Structure formats: C-alpha cells, structure tokens
Image: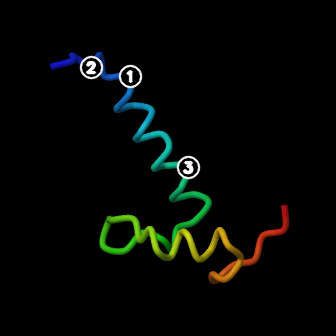
Amino acid sequence: MEKLDGTSMNLVQENIKKLKEIFPEIFIEGRIDFDLLRQICRGGGTRFRKF
C-alpha cells in the first residue's frame, strides 16, 4: 500500500473549497451533486457562463 504524505488530501480539500465558491448549488447535504455539476458545465444549469 502506498503511503500518502497528506499533500494529496490538502489538494482535494482545496479543490472542494474552490467548487463551493464557484458552484455552491451543487452541494446537497454536504455532498456534490455531480449530475447537477455536469448540467451546469454544459450550460443547462442554474447559471450560464460564457467562456
């Protein structure tokens, strides 16, 4: 089994924090609604983002 130094967990937590800032509506009861995230990223969600 590979040992982790904690860096990867910090990276995951940082990414979750960023998602909460950008897409707070995808968090349902503390969990990510990946279907809603996909829908938003395709332009069919609750927000429209032009890139």
Amino acid on which the number 1 mark rests in the picture: Thr
Label 2 belongs to which residue? 4
The tag earlier along the polypeptide, 1 or 3, is: 1
As drawn, 7 above or below 27: above
> Whole-percent x and y of residue 37?
53, 69
How many C-alpha atoms fall within 10 Å of the one at disc 3: few (<14), some, or many (≥20)? few
Q: Nearer the viewer, residue 16 or 1?
A: 1
Query: Could you tell me if the residues under marks 2 and 1 are in contact, i.e. CB atoms within 8 Å?
Result: yes
Total numbered circles = 3
Q: Residue at x 41, y 39 (%)?
A: 12
Query: CA gap, disc 2 to disc 1?
Result: 7 Å
> Whole-percent x and y of residue 28?
37, 74
The tag earlier along the polypeptide, 3 or 2, is: 2
As drawn, 8 above or below 50: above
Amino acid on which the number 3 mark rests in the picture: Lys
Mark 2 lies on a secondary structure that is: loop
Amino acid on which the number 2 mark rests in the picture: Leu
How many C-alpha atoms fall within 10 Å of the one at disc 2: few (<14), some, or many (≥20)? few
Mark 1 lies on a secondary structure that is: helix
Label 1 belongs to which residue? 7
Q: Residue at x 33, y 65 (%)?
A: 31
Q: Quadrant of the N terminus?
A: top left
Label 3 belongs to which residue? 18
